[in-house]
Image (tube, grey):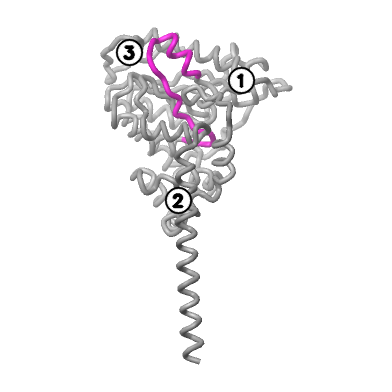
Amino acid sequence: MNKDILRFFKNLLILIAIMFVVDRGVGSILEYYFKKQPMGDDAAFAHALDNPTEDILFYGSSRAVHTYNCAIFTDSLGLTAYNCGRNASNIIYHAAIISAAFEKSTPKAVVLDISPKELSWKSGQGGDDVLSAMILPYITTNKNFESLAKELFPKELIKAKISKLYTYNSMIASIIRNSNRTKNDNINGYQPLHGAKVDEDPKVVDAAKSDVSEYAKEKLEFFVKTVTEHHVPLIVIISPIYALPAPPTPSMIETKKILDKYNVEIWDYSFDTAFIKRKYFYDLVHLNTKGADLFSSLIASRMKAMGIGNKDTTFNIGKKQDSIILKK
């Protein structure tokens, strides 16, 4: 009987050892190819986190990724630009990576694209799996992500620390796909959308009942404070939406309070009639390449009017001035 018990535990230990070796081995291989992806969201994000040394940095969700054409800003302003946006991300994510923008250099301007419901995200109400998948690969190298995971996904953090394979198991398909792609539409983080799938007239989108997350408010304020305390112009934009005008959402009301505290205003193009046309939209919330180029040119022109260009400019961030913030 004792021999049987000893044999059982011996075999169990061997099995655990094999599982550990396989986990670390396969996990390390996936980690290697994850970091070596030549294109895709993860490749763009790696640059945004590790080497965001461009003059102009854009942050936001997929609406930023598909809206701000960096080539247009470079041509217009004579400055380098990088789109640090991330599909399916939100202010929680942006707040975790903004500090990287000031670790190796200081940008000449930061643009944050937000949605009318930017502050409505709450842990446990959807999107947790997407956000956790974004940050888990970096918990061992980025203290902001480790802290964020500890606050929002403590169980996921434990799993990721125990199993290296667990961190990447949801990314295997994208790693393979991105590693074998030959065409790269990515222009310094900007990903153009071609065509127009909108086949209806714009409607009023009722978001008045959306809740506001105190946690998201804290993260927005952290983002704004981080940029402005470095005396860097912060431009907050609501890019066009294919919808009819609607009352301000609770999220936008709270967002404005935070921005007012730091003397930053919103460039609100959400319901701009110049853009609410089918030919400019890929779908209801994303501009296509035609709309993105037009909008990028408009924003670049406004930035140039602020004095942001290929020469160094001194900005007074402490006061609301037309040289810093232009009302539409």
The quadrant holding residue 323 is top left
The residue carrying mark 2 is: 28
Q: CA distance from mark 1 to mark 3?
A: 33 Å
Q: The magenta stretch spans which residues?
A: 69-90
Q: Which mark is residue 321?
A: 3
Q: Where is residue 108 shown, x and y percent of the image?
A: 33, 19
Mark 1 and mark 2 in contact (Cβ < 8 Å)? Answer: no
Comes first in the chain, label 2 or label 3: 2
Comes first in the chain, label 1 or label 3: 1
**Front residue of 233 and 15:** 15
Mark 3 and mark 1 in contact (Cβ < 8 Å)? Answer: no
Q: Which mark is residue 288?
A: 1
Element under label 2?
Answer: helix
Side of 261 relative to 239 (left or right): left
Task: For marks 1 and 3, give the one nearer the viewer.
Answer: 1
Identity of the residue drawn at 63% across and 28% down: 205
Task: For marks 2 and 3, give the one nearer the viewer.
Answer: 2
Task: For marks 2 and 1, give the one nearer the viewer.
Answer: 2
Q: Is residue 74 magenta?
A: yes
Determine crowd level at label 2: few under 14, some 14-19, many 20+ residues with C-alpha closer than 10 A.
some
Q: Amino acid at mark 2?
A: Ser
Q: Where is residue 34 shown, x and y percent of the image?
A: 48, 42
Element under label 3?
Answer: loop
**Front residue of 246 and 30:** 30
Q: Is residue 46 magenta?
A: no
Element under label 1?
Answer: loop
The quadrant holding residue 274 is top right
Q: Amino acid at mark 1?
A: Asn
Q: Amino acid at mark 3?
A: Gln
